[in-house]
Image (cartoon, rainbow, N blue to C red):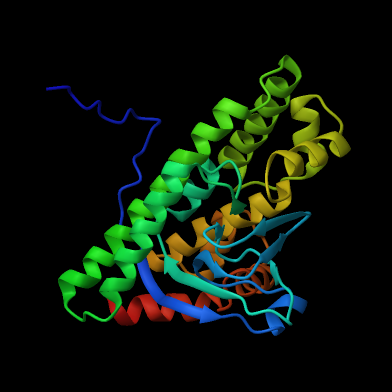
Amino acid sequence: MQKFPRSGPQQKPINSLPDIAAIGDRIFEPYWAIHDHCAQNCEFLMVTEGRLRTRLGRRRFETGPGDVALIPPGKRHRDEFDPQQVLKIFMVSYHWQDAARYFKMLPHCAGMPLSTNARHEVESLVTRMRSLLHSGTQTDRLLCRACLLNLLLTILHDQMQHNTQAGDHTPGARHRHALMLKARHYLDKHYTEEISLEHIARTLQISPFYLSHLFSQENDFSLMEYLTNLRMQKAKLLLQGGRHSIKEAAYAVGYNDGNYFTKVFRRHFGFTPRDLRDASRGSA
C-alpha cells in the first residue's frame, strides 16, 4: 500500500466543502450581454447550448457546449452572446472559504479548455448534481456539495497539468513569473501598510510600468485589484470574528480612513462592514 504524503507547512490543503447558494439550468437574459456585473459568490458555468464569450478585465474567453467557466467572487465581468440564439447554462453559485487560495493557484479563470478525461469527469459530476437537485434530504445536499468540490479540484488539476506541459519555460518566462510571485509575496506580507506601485517596483528593482504590465499579463487581475481583494478578505474574517470594530478592522488591513474602507468594502462585497458585523453577532 502506497503512503499518501501529508501536506507541508507551506502547502495547506483545500478540503472545505463549498456552500451552494443556487444551482440549476438557466437561460441567460440579453441584459447580461451588455452590462458588466459581479456577484458576491463564486460562479461555475457549463454551457449546454449556444456559445458564450466571457469578458473578464482585458481578457475574453470563448466557451461552447460542454465548456466550463469559473468566475471569482466580486470580479466584474460580462457574459456576451448572440441574443438571437438561445444560451443555456448549468450554473452553480457558491460561497467557499478556500476560494481565494483556489483561484490563486488556478492558472486562468473564466473559460478554460479541458482535456478529454477532465471534460468527461466534469460532465459526469454535473449529471450527478442534477440528479440530486430534486432530492431534499440533508445527505443529498451534502453529496451535491462534495460533487462540486470534486468538480473544482478536477478542473484545477487539469489546468495545472496543462499549464506545466504547454507553458513557456524559457529563462525570460521563468524570470517574469518569479517577479510576479515576489510581488504577490510582498503584498501578502505588507498588506497592512501603505503600499504604492512605485514602492513595490523599487523593492523589486523594476519600473512601475513594467511591474503593472507584468502582473496583469500573468494574472486575470491587476496588482492593485489583488491587493484590494486580499485586504477585503482579511477584513471580512476580522469582522466575522466579532472582536474587532469597523475602525479596528480597517486599520488592521491598511486603511486609515474608516469611511473610505466602508466604501471599498461595500463595492467589493455588495454589503457594508456593519451589515456583516451585525449578522455575525446575531448568529453567534
Instruction: Where is residue 2? Give x, y as percent.
Output: 17, 22
In percent of width and height, residue 39 lies at: 57, 72
Q: In this picture, is 22 found above or below 255?
A: below
Instruction: Identify which residue, 29 or 98, lies in the foreground.
Output: 29
Instruction: Out of 76 and 122, give the one closest to the viewer.
Output: 122
| Quadrant in the picture for residue 243 | bottom left
Instruction: Say if residue 35 shows up in the picture.
Output: no
Image point (52%, 40%), residue name:
159
The one of 95 and 163 positioned closer to us in this rendering: 163
Q: What is the total number of numbered labels drawn onto the structure image? A: 0
Q: Is residue 61 visible?
A: yes
Q: Is residue 5 above or below residue 270?
A: above
Q: 211 and 62: which one is in front?
A: 62
* Viewport quadrant of the C terminus: bottom left
Q: Position of residue 209 (x, y in %)?
A: 88, 38
Please, which residue is most extreme toward the left here? Answer: 1
To which quarter of the image does residue 52 belong?
bottom right
Q: Residue, x 53% and y 44% (percent of image)?
A: 106
Q: Position of residue 103 (x, y in %)?
A: 53, 49
Vertical placement of residue 40 versus 178, above or below? below
Q: Point out the image quarter for the N terminus.
A: top left
Q: Is residue 222 above or below residue 1?
A: below
